Amino acid sequence: MKAKLKLHWQIAVAMLLGLGAGILFQTLQDGEPHGWIYAGISAMGTVFIRLLRMVIVPLIFTSIVTGVSGVGDSRRLGRLGTKTFAYYLVSSLLAIVIGILLANTIRPGVGARIGAGHDFDPAGLNTPSSPVQILIDMIPLNPIKAAAEGQILGIIFFAIFLGVALNRLGGESRRFLEGFFRAGFEVMMQITDMVIRLAPLGVFGLVTQAVAGAGLELFRTLGLYMITILTGFSIHMFAVLPTLLFFTTRLDPRRHFRAMAPAMMTAFSTCSSNATLPVTMNNVEKRAGVSNTVSSFVLPLGATVNMNGTALYECAGVIFISQVLGMQLTLAHQFTVVLTALLSAVGCAGIPSAGLVVIFIVTQAIGFQDAQVGVIIGAMLAVDRPLDMFRTMVNIFSDSVGAVVVAHSEGEKGLYPEEPQ
């Protein structure tokens, strides 16, 4: 019987091929890739992202309604919510502390010279007015409009309310609606499985495009900054989160890394927590053995709310900016950075480079003007793609750990089956 290469290895091979193809295009075409071959390869990545985005809203909506209404006992629903948000708060605060400690220890911005040639106009960015406004915007004025515009927080808020109301409903109406939403969820999971099979082709196109368009000069200029951020991501993902998983469940973290390999590689290549959500849910349920009740409650929330990598990046990035400007942030300033990063990460869209946009909220919170930091953030944008890849991987890995922690606390058995599908 001919052995078939597992999906995560197919994705790994696609990433290596994409790296080689990207370097080839950049070398042969002086960093300005063009031509029908390059356009065709790039299109594979674009199509894959569009397919993933296609399933996001109906998958999130049906999964949350099904998960919340299926809890049964309203006391268990409150218990799931309390545990989920407690995990999000602890993991995000740990990530923020790591970012601040590394930025203050390595001090990547001290003595840095970022040329004025990298002009960047912050007025062109659309950022939320405040973290409080993010919380207000969670309540959609029109749930249908929120779904059409992809307002994930609004969709989640309405879906939870609908699930709670359905949970309180009785008789034939409840059975009919539960069956309707569960059928919709099962259809969306089938569509998701079909899309996931195309991941290697999509990853090849995305990585080729990212490598072909990247410059090298600014990478060298901001090398220490990148090392600081990547070190923080590595510590959080390979030390803090596995330790948190082990001490709360007594399960081997290595099994979780193996179970989540396809989702992590998809996150690395797409730079989107939302786009990776279908793969994350698939891996958590089929490879980690978490029930749909828990995964459909924890993961959609986590894809928008639990941004560990983004929170770490924002704190370290703001301190880097202050160092480039020659300013020493006080403890009070750094506390403001922590609080603002924690809240703004909640509303950070799960799309590529969204964290770099939200960083303006944090810089404004400590008194920096956009005109002062615009050039620096523009330079950071030039090297954001590789950081965004790791940042997204940390985000979704933390979500998946949270799902296992909550499932274990709920007494679920059979976590990490020996032969994941």
Image: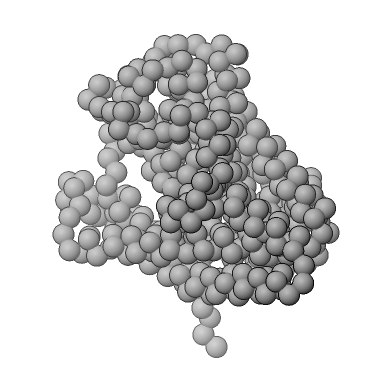
Of the pair 74 and 303, the residue shown nearer to us: 74
Whether residue 267 can be seen here: no
Residue 374 location (% of width, % of height): 33, 24
Quarter of the image where the N terminus is located: bottom right
As drawn, the residue found furthest toward the bottom would be 1
Residue 271 location (% of width, % of height): 44, 49
Residue at 23 percent across and 49 percent down: it is: 26
Of the pair 280 and 320, the residue shown nearer to us: 280
Q: Is residue 360 left or right of residue 119?
A: right
Residue at 50 percent across and 17 percent down: it is: 366
Residue at 59 percent across and 64 percent down: it is: 62
Q: Is residue 34 left or right of residue 58?
A: left
Among the 4 quarters of the image, the one containing residue 18? bottom left
Query: How many marks overall?
Result: 0
Among the 4 quarters of the image, the one containing residue 332? top right
Q: In this picture, is 228 found above or below 386? A: above
Q: Is residue 2 left or right of residue 288?
A: left
Residue at 45 percent across and 53 percent down: it is: 145
Residue 162 location (% of width, % of height): 64, 57
Among the 4 quarters of the image, the one containing residue 403? bottom right
Quarter of the image where the C terminus is located: bottom right
Check the image and tell me how it is coloured.
one colour
Q: Is residue 28 left or right of residue 1?
A: left
Residue 363 location (% of width, % of height): 46, 22
Q: In this picture, is 76 found above or below 134? A: below
Whether residue 140 can be seen here: yes
Of the pair 105 and 322, the residue shown nearer to us: 322
